[in-house]
Amino acid sequence: MTARQPAPTLACLAECRRSKGVSLSQISEATKISRRYLEAIEQGEFKALPGGVYGVNYVRQYARAAGYDEEDLVAAYRQLAPPEPLEAAPQAPDPWACRLRDSLSWLFPIRSA
């Protein structure tokens, strides 16, 4: 197993990759990640990446394919990536409204056409 180099700063990712003789097309073919996402990683444009585990996985695969330490690059991604918006938990239906609707259903029957 080859030892991984520490990840370079985001400012020189593309330059360091090119100095190793690795093209974005080669990384794209190896990882099956779109070239535009790989370019976004190199430019530090993490807003362009899919959120959550997908973005982390893209950064990790890029690092692996380029021969960098995955954890260094993922740490930089997590530090610079936009935070994930918190979604509101779905509200449970009000049990009293359901009981009222059910108890009045005999009084106001709903007819289907």
Image (cartoon, grey):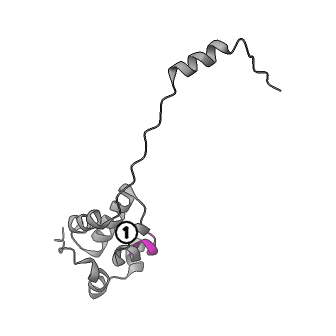
Which residue is pictured at 68% across the width and 15% down the height?
Answer: 105
The answer to which image quadrant residue 99 occupies is top right
- Quadrant that contains the N terminus: bottom left
Residue 43 x %, y %: 36, 78
Q: Which residue is mark 1?
A: 46
> Compared to 92, does 110 lie above or below?
above
The answer to which image quadrant residue 78 occupies is bottom left
The reply to whether residue 78 is visible in this rendering is yes
Q: Is residue 87 magenta?
A: no
Which residue is pictured at 23% across the width and 64% down the height?
Answer: 75
Which residue is pictured at 21% across the width and 74% down the height?
Answer: 7
Residue 51 x %, y %: 40, 59
Residue 68 x %, y %: 23, 73
- 104 lies left or right of 65: right
- 30 lies left or right of 74: right
Which residue is pictured at 36% across the width and 55% down the height?
Answer: 53
Q: Secondary structure at mark 1?
A: helix
